[in-house]
Image (cartoon, grey):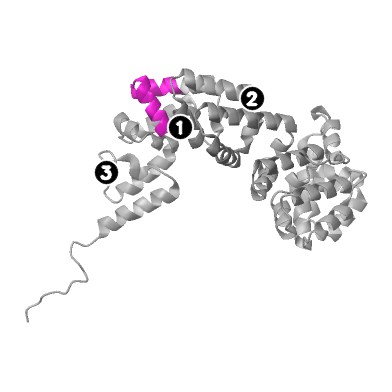
């Protein structure tokens, strides 16, 4: 069972400050953020400015980006700097963090200390923790929902997610920690049930689930109803349970973030564009799931771009993954291959397909093959004297 709830700490005043300032009350952009006028300097908290200056913080940068922070009557510059220094942050690191996230100085030191303890649940090494804060200061200084955040961290640990993965969630997918713990548990339960209902085995379920979450934690932002609706849609389209599992793995769970109506439109367009049967369309989708998540205008633009380069519909059907590339990338790669005398119109599209690294590797092989001498330069020459 989960440990006792974390005592709710004082919420960051940044949140209440933002709520207090509704959009119509803002001054015109230039007037509000200009720092050269006497009236602006009079409104700034001089003690705050002086303390920041002592820490070698670029005050001009703060004025330009988030000058409203300097207008706050109550700030905690020294306290926040002290917390960071206790973790081992250098003077340069402290200044950089406060420049990038000036809101930190209006957060309660109690709340920030609690946040530090929460992050240390998954990142015990203080040096690594400082680096995380340097990279993602806004995530660290978003100090609301701390009680709920702790429960979610413990839940993810109980699921079997590694601390390094949970650390990545805290920095790049912090929204999932604002979900009530029961909501996240419900989504996990639906995913587990769906996996088993689609023919997945109990033995492989944990590995599948952890991989899905690590690849796409935002899946937890979906509702249970949306997940069920998406699965039912694909079943109605004639996809087998095994094929749906394939799509889930290839799309890393993004399948649940797609709207069934949008998917239907994209599939109908692809069926007409490629003049194929329902069965053939399914095979195309399984080879290239991009046909599901790209909108009709995007698909149309990319197909037209390929046709303009002299590529046929038959070639695209053979290698549909080429639709994952923008027209600009396709043009660049075709020109580069043409420079070697490689005719893409008559060849296979696999040579322009793939990531940048994969394309460069293929291009290098073709280039080496084109430049290879017809004779063996190592073999001795028989020359009659």
Question: In which quadrant is the N terminus drawn?
Answer: top right
- What range is drawn magenta here? 267-291
- Near mark 2 (Cα within 10 A), the count class, few <14, some 14-19 or many ≥20, is some
* Residue at 39 percent of width and 52 percent of height: 360
Instruction: Name the residue tied to disc 3.
Output: 343
Give the vertical position of 53 relative to 297 (above or below).
Answer: below
Mark toward the viewer: 3 or 1? 1
As rendered, which of 253 and 71 lies closer to the eye? 253
Queried whether the magenta region covers residue 286, the answer comes back as: yes
Q: Quadrant of residue 69?
A: top right
Is there a contact, CB below 8 Å, between mark 3 and mark 1? no
Name the front one of labels 1 and 2. 2
| Residue 94 lies in the magenta-colored region | no
Residue at the far bottom: name it: 385
Mark closer to the chain start, 3 or 1: 1
> Can you identify the residue that label 2 sits on?
224
Residue at image point 57% right, 38% down? 212
Dot 1 lies on which element?
loop
Spatial CA distance of label 3 from label 1 is 28 Å
Within-10-Å neighbours for mark 3: few <14, some 14–19, many 20+: few
* Vertical side of 275 occupied by 77: above or below: below
**Which of the two labelled residues, at mark 1 and mark 2, occupies the earlier sequence position?**
2
Residue 303 visible in image: yes
Give the percent coordinates (x, y) of residue 166. Answer: 67, 45
Q: Is residue 346 left or right of residue 200?
A: left
Q: Secondary structure at mark 3?
A: loop
60 lies above or below 30: below
The residue wearing badge 1 is 289
Instruction: Give the label, 2 or 3, closer to the camera.
Output: 2
Residue at left offset 73%, top offset 52%: 133
């Amino acid at each position: 069972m989960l440990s006792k709830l974390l005592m709710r700490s004082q919420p960051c005043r940044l949140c209440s400050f933002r709520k207090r300032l509704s959009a119509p009350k803002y001054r015109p952009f230039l007037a509000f953020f200009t720092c050269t006028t006497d009236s602006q300097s009079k409104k700034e908290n001089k003690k705050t400015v002086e303390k920041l200056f002592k820490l070698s913080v670029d005050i001009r940068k703060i004025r330009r980006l988030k000058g409203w922070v300097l207008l706050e009557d109550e700030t905690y510059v020294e306290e926040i700097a002290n917390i960071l220094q206790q973790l081992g942050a250098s003077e340069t690191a402290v200044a950089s963090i406060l420049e990038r996230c000036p809101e930190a100085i209006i957060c309660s030191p109690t709340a920030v200390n609690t946040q530090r303890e929460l992050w240390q649940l998954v990142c015990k090494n203080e040096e690594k923790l400082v680096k995380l804060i340097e990279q993602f200061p806004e995530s660290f200084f978003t100090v609301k929902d701390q009680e709920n955040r702790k429960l979610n961290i413990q839940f993810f640990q109980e699921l079997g997610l590694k601390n390094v993965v949970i650390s990545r969630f805290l920095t790049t997918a912090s929204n999932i920690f604002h979900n009530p713990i029961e909501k996240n548990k419900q989504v996990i339960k639906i995913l587990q049930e769906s996996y088993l209902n689609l023919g997945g085995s109990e033995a492989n379920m944990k590995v599948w689930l952890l991989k899905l979450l690590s690849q796409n934690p935002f899946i937890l932002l979906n509702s249970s109803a949306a997940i069920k609706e998406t699965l039912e849609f694909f079943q109605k389209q004639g996809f087998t349970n095994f094929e749906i599992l394939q799509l889930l793995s290839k799309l890393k769970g993004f399948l649940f973030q797609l709207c069934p109506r949008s998917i239907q439109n994209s599939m109908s367009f692809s069926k007409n564009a490629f003049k194929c049967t329902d069965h053939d369309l399914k095979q195309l989708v399984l080879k290239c799931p991009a046909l599901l998540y790209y909108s009709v205008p995007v698909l149309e633009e990319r197909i037209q771009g390929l046709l303009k380069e002299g590529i046929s519909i038959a070639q695209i059907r053979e290698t549909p993954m080429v639709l994952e590339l923008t027209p600009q990338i396709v043009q660049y790669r075709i020109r580069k291959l043409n420079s070697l005398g490689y005719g893409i119109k008559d060849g296979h599209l696999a040579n322009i397909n793939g990531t940048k690294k994969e394309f460069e590797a293929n291009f290098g092989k073709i280039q080496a093959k084109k430049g290879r001498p017809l004779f063996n330069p190592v073999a001795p020459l028989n020359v009659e004297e």
